[in-house]
Image: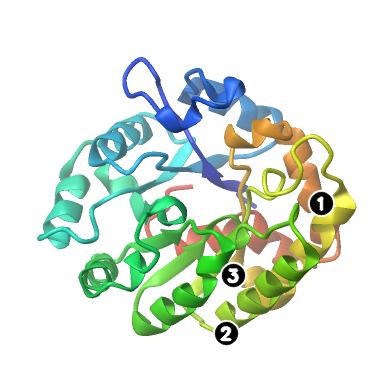
Amino acid sequence: MTVIDAHVHLWDLDVRPQPWTDPFPVLQRSYRVDELAAVLDAHGVDAAVVVQAGDTTGETRDLLALAAGTDRLAGVVGWVDLAGADVAGDLSALRAAPGGDKLVAVRHQLQVEPDPDYVARADVRAGLGAVAAAGLTYDLVISPFQLPVVIDVVAAVPTLRFVLDHAGKPPIAGPGAELDRWRADLARLAEAPNVAVKVSGLVTEADWASWTQPQLDPVITHVLDSFGPSRVMVGSDWPVCLLAADYGAVQATVAPALARLGADGRADVLGGTAARWYPGLTA
């Protein structure tokens, strides 16, 4: 069984600053592929999918070039301007760049997008159509209040595979009513067959200093019950997870749920779903 971490980040602040890290001292340094490889080795993980942190094609080209030089990066989730005049051409240019064969998906920082209806706009939906035509997947990084519009969008583009990052950011640290709304919306989203979900980023949706496993277990169980193991993948969100937990602690959060699955289900969640959902994944 190949174990794939479906969600990590890398950045070299000497090459490309990441201003969003400024409030977080633990993230205010470079995280490079050699450090990631050591972390993966220490925890029995074969490869990872590296995901864009900034909405620029320059960063995407950097990540593709890194992926070209190592088999520890099985794929890249990059960025293009979905509202651009030639999304198909932009995707072709990325695929022609060094490491372009490892481009498996694209993503936009929807959770901080000033336009709350961005992903529902006609020009953006046309861009999503170009992603589908290119045979790529689209990662959704959102806040939970955006789940209803996402439900509409995935129905409007049924030929595109979507991956919901961080389980839609359930408000684990918020009021119970908010978590109930997330639970209902996630179940509705799971009705769409063209959506998979990542169990990732949960420790940073809880209280960073005092999260507990009993807080996470019902969330992870709801994700698995709603989507089934064949549409669930796990990711560490390293190094962002370091705000609340180290890599080993994040791995341990999914262990109780995995123990309740059969061998096939565990294989799906730990790598099989990612390998199917991201076309061309090389692990």
> CB atoms at circles 3 and 2 under 8 Å apart?
no
**Image position, residue 175 (x, y; %):** 77, 61
Q: Find disc 2 in the rendering and name its residue.
A: 191
Circle 1: is it few (<14), some (14-19), or many (20+) Cα within 10 Å?
few
Left or right for 56, reference 25: left
Circle 2: is it few (<14), some (14-19), or many (20+) Cα within 10 Å?
few
Residue 228 appears in the figure? no
Which amino acid type is shown beneath numbered disc 3? Arg
Local secondary structure at mark 2 = loop
x 73%, y 61%: residue? 266
Left or right for 163, reference 166: left
Residue 147 vs residue 282, the one in the foreground: 147
Circle 3: is it few (<14), some (14-19), or many (20+) Cα within 10 Å?
many
Q: What whole-number distance in Å separates the C-alpha atoms at marks 3 and 2?
A: 11 Å
x 58%, y 26%: residue? 24
Q: Find disc 1 in the rendering and name its residue.
A: 255
Left or right for 192, reference 261: left
Q: Is 259 located above or below residue 13 in the figure?
A: below
Q: Is 78 located above or below residue 184 in the figure?
A: above
Upstream in sequence: badge 3 or badge 2: 2
**Mark seen at residue 231:** 3
Q: What whole-number distance in Å separates the C-alpha atoms at marks 2 and 1?
A: 26 Å
Which amino acid type is shown beneath numbered disc 1? Ala
